[in-house]
Image (tube, grey):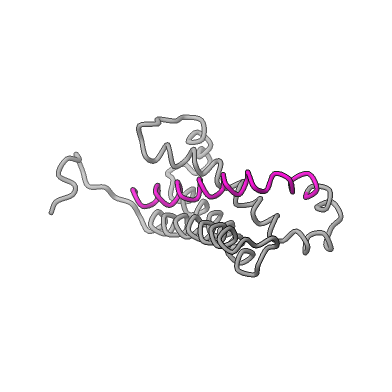
Amino acid sequence: LNFTATFSHAVEWGWPIAVYLLLAGMSGGALIAAIVLKRYKRQDGFSPFFKAASLLAFVSIMLGMVCLIADLEKPLLFWKILINYNFTSVMSIGVAALCVFIPLSFLMCLYAFNSELKSFCGFFDGVMKILSPLYPLLSALCLLFAVIICAYTGFL
């Protein structure tokens, strides 16, 4: 089968894009597993699995972003991708979803490591008192965007 038959030239993505797609899919999958398992088991606290998955999700999506930006011809102009959207393109939808998913994955890390951060720095205690009531909403949004990220990387 010739999958490039309708293109004027072959689709050429280097290895950084393949690594980025792997890392982004892994990030979304880790948070999906963590949030669904936490809800299924009706856990009040954050298990070691949730902590590991949230940390894996945040670190892998950030490493994926490094790969994505490094692959650009002009990496210092990557910010233009963030303001020019074409919502008929899977890539544009993915970039918009990443702009929401990355901060949400960071918040899931903050929730997961709340007790450790409290002992490290008192500042996080005040921040987490504000964010704690929002956890059900933010975890639902994180789950939604994790599924979108997995679908986006699967389509690409």
Nearest the camera: 60 or 15?
Answer: 60
Q: Quick one: which residue is furthest to the right in this view?
A: 122
Q: Position of residue 154 (x, y in %)?
A: 36, 52
For residue 47, above or below residue 88? below
Q: Is residue 153 magenta?
A: yes
70 part of magenta stretch:
no
User: At 51% from the left edge and 37% from the top edge, which residue is drawn?
Assistant: 77
Side (left or right) of 136 relative to 153: right
Report the side of 148 relative to 156 (left or right): right
For residue 156, side relative to residue 103 (left or right): left
Q: Quadrant of residue 34?
A: bottom right
Q: Main secondary structure of the magenta part?
A: helix
Image point 51% across, 30% down: which residue? 83
Q: Position of residue 40 (x, y in %)?
A: 55, 61
Residue 95's spot in the image, x, y percent? 47, 40
Q: Is residue 30 above or below residue 148?
A: below
**Side of 90 relative to 133 (left or right):** left
Q: Which residues are magenta?
A: 128-156
User: Which residue lies most toward the left here?
Assistant: 1
Tell me the quadrant of the picture where the N terminus can be found: bottom left
Residue 118, image quadrant = bottom right
Asked if residue 30 is positioned above or below residue 98 in the image, the reply reads: below
Q: Of residues 71 and 65, which is closer to you in this image?
A: 65
Which residue is pictured at 64% across the width and 47% down the height?
A: 136
**Of 13 and 39, which appears nearest the observer?**
39
